[in-house]
Image (cartoon, helix red, strand yellow):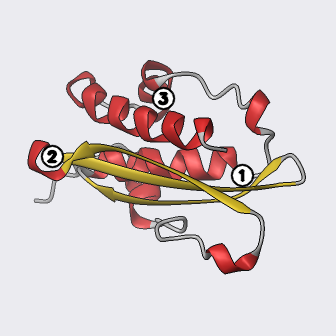
Amino acid sequence: MSVDLLEPQIRELFTTLDHAGELDPAEGASVATGEAGREELGTRVRIALRIADGRVQAVRYRAYGCPHTLATCEWLARTLEGRRPDALEIGNPLDWARQLDVPAAKLGRLLVVEDALQAALTRS
């Protein structure tokens, strides 16, 4: 008997990491990146944002971590695209954990994701 330990939403996001990868700086518009965490500590995240015409045109990430970390990166990428950087209103890691049913024990991983995102946004 197989037991699925991942919540359905986390499983769906984790199995379709469409935004994983890099942005090509040659495609025009500036690319702002932010990084946080360390692999030795279990989580490292790099987020890249392409901002043009006052909107987040594209988001890509590279992440080392658990399925919850990668699923949260994918959810954020989907959520951020098309929005204005100054009006994101995406909440904080506790909000994300509630929305995605991430266990409380994984909240520290989401803080690393937040740090990478904030670093990218300050460079945009």
Residue 64: give x, y in percent of width and height.
Answer: 26, 56
Measure how far apart labels 2 and 1 are at the Cα level: 27 Å
Marks 1 & 3, CB-CB < 8 Å contact: no
Does residue 77 appear to the left or right of 54 in the view shown? left
10 Å crowding of disc 1: few (<14), some (14-19), many (20+): some
Residue hosting label 2: 42
- Residue 14: mark in rendering: none
Residue hosting label 3: 96
Among the two numbered marks 2 and 1 on one chain, the one whose residue lies closer to the N terminus: 2
Among the two numbered marks 2 and 3 on one chain, the one whose residue lies closer to the N terminus: 2
Dot 3: what SS? helix
Measure how far apart labels 1 and 3 are at the Cα level: 17 Å
Residue hosting label 1: 81
Does residue 104 appear to the left or right of 31 in the view shown? left
Does residue 110 appear to the left or right of 54 in the view shown? left
Q: Nearer the viewer, mark 1 or mark 3?
A: 1
Q: Residue at x 35, y 29 (%)?
A: 111
Which is nearer the eye, 86 or 32? 32
Q: Which of the 4 quarters of the picture holds residue 49? A: bottom right
Does residue 33 appear to the left or right of 58 in the view shown? left
Mark 2: amino acid: Gly
